Image (tube, coloured by chain):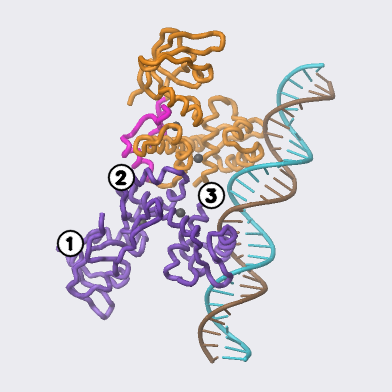
Chain colours: A orange, B purple, C brown, D cyan
Amino acid sequence: MNSSTEEDYLKAIYKLSPKFPDGVLTSAIAEVLETKASSVTDMLKKLSEKGYINYVKYQGVTLQPIGEEVAIRVIRKHRLWEVFLAEKLDFTWDEIHEIAEQLEHIVSVNLIDRLDKYLGFPKFDPHGDPIPDKNGKFQKIKDVALRDLNVGDIAILVGVREHSKEFLQYLENIKLLLGSKIEVINKFAFDESVLVRINGKSEIMLSSLLCKNISVTHEKPKK
Amino acid sequence: MNSSTEEDYLKAIYKLSPKFPDGVLTSAIAEVLETKASSVTDMLKKLSEKGYINYVKYQGVTLQPIGEEVAIRVIRKHRLWEVFLAEKLDFTWDEIHEIAEQLEHIVSVNLIDRLDKYLGFPKFDPHGDPIPDKNGKFQKIKDVALRDLNVGDIAILVGVREHSKEFLQYLENIKLLLGSKIEVINKFAFDESVLVRINGKSEIMLSSLLCKNISVTHEKPKK
DNA sequence: TCAACCATTTAGACTAGTCTAAACATTTCT
DNA sequence: AGAAATGTTTAGACTAGTCTAAATGGTTGA
Ligand SMILES: [Mn+2]
Ligand SMILES: [Mn+2]
Ligand SMILES: [Mn+2]
Ligand SMILES: [Mn+2]
């Protein structure tokens, strides 16, 4: 059994791995977990002892298969609880993350599979992120950042690459939500802002930072 | 904000209070929380410092209003989550307690009231215990132990006074559930066992210990 | 190549919670 | 009343997790 702290570390390492192919750095983990590098080092030693990770001093850390398994299980729980909070309890997508951050650590053999069934085995969470099934398998979505579209392109918003309240509330405000249709009207090289039409209605100017954090695709995500 | 450990202590003190009108004893708390008396003493000092309880060395402890408030809030959360687990996820009444023991500590301003609404504002949990409303108010049920009925009495099972898996699974086995109709056919002074008919069907002999832990009333509990 | 800089680890301290063993109160019994 | 038994608190130690400050490794670039 793992403590919720251990689970959060493994999850953080898992999420950082793609950006650090030959070892996630201590400082990167410290940043996402909002803790100090020295605390991270302590935990890395412990997780290494326990066989969850491969840790070489000063070189960074990679997940062992068993560590990845734990991470994926926690992510599955997190995202299923997010679906529950959004669909059944009507929370908005900026409110669910911090509650799910706690719920993901509830321990029970059956709970999460029953919740999965109750929710109808959803494939994506309210932020568009894929939900691993009980065997840890999930689709990698082939999406692209909104900033990489060309003028004239039409796309569907399928995910966000940033989960802060500020960002999500902003999108909610301008009615830019999961599934929204986005037409690229114009792009301005000067500040890399993009003019788009949302759902065939309002035209709006989006900043470079915004466009970098919105994932779109030309096909709708399957269920 | 309170740690989940503090919450569990306050809840334990609250539940023990009726049996210890002039101060809950250290050893009683240690027993229900499955910890050592010395650990309890440490926590009592801390809770006293913080103003949640009134603690006099060697004399036992009583709740301050603020401590009772916390306890009732935790109990509300526990019982609402139990309803969710039983009604929505089809867990049986012997499985829900230990999961709710964790869920009761989830921190969120809105979560529990939304869950309450989603469940239709239930008044009783799957064990027949009353659920405090958002103001901490709840009906005290005027029930009686099955062992105190007389031959010929007819009653409805409205609660259990013991929450162990063994006890609840036993009741489930003999189809003695919340709402069951119980007719007292005979009582035997020798070992205080009681012969009953359940729901007008099977006759069965119940042990003294069983009868002591079943709450019944002549009226059905309201919704 | 070696000095300077930056990242990482170590050393040592702190908090929350727990335990065992010893000391101390309270109650009970003779 | 005094002694014995029982319950409670204290003392001191341990684990998990965190922090600051100091030491050390690695990297860059003059
Ligand atoms: Mn978490
Ligand atoms: Mn999410
Ligand atoms: Mn609990
Ligand atoms: Mn209950």
Q: CA distance from mark 3 to mark 1?
A: 47 Å
Quadrant in which residue B54 is drawn = bottom right
Q: Residues within 10 Å of mark 1 (few under 14, many from 20)?
A: some
Identity of the residue drawn at 37% across and 36% down: A90
**Which x, y percent locates residue A24?**
59, 30
Residue position for label 1 = B199
Which amino acid, by three-letter code, is at mark 1? Asn
* Residue A135 lies in the magenta stretch: yes
- Predominant SS of the magenta segment: loop
- Asked if ligand 4 lies within 8 A of label 2, the reply is no
Identify the residue under disc 3: B1
Which secondary structure, mark 1? loop
Which quadrant does the C terminus of chain B fall into?
Answer: bottom left
Q: Return the chain for callout 2.
A: B
Against B85, is A21 above or below? above
As drawn, the label of residue B88 is 2
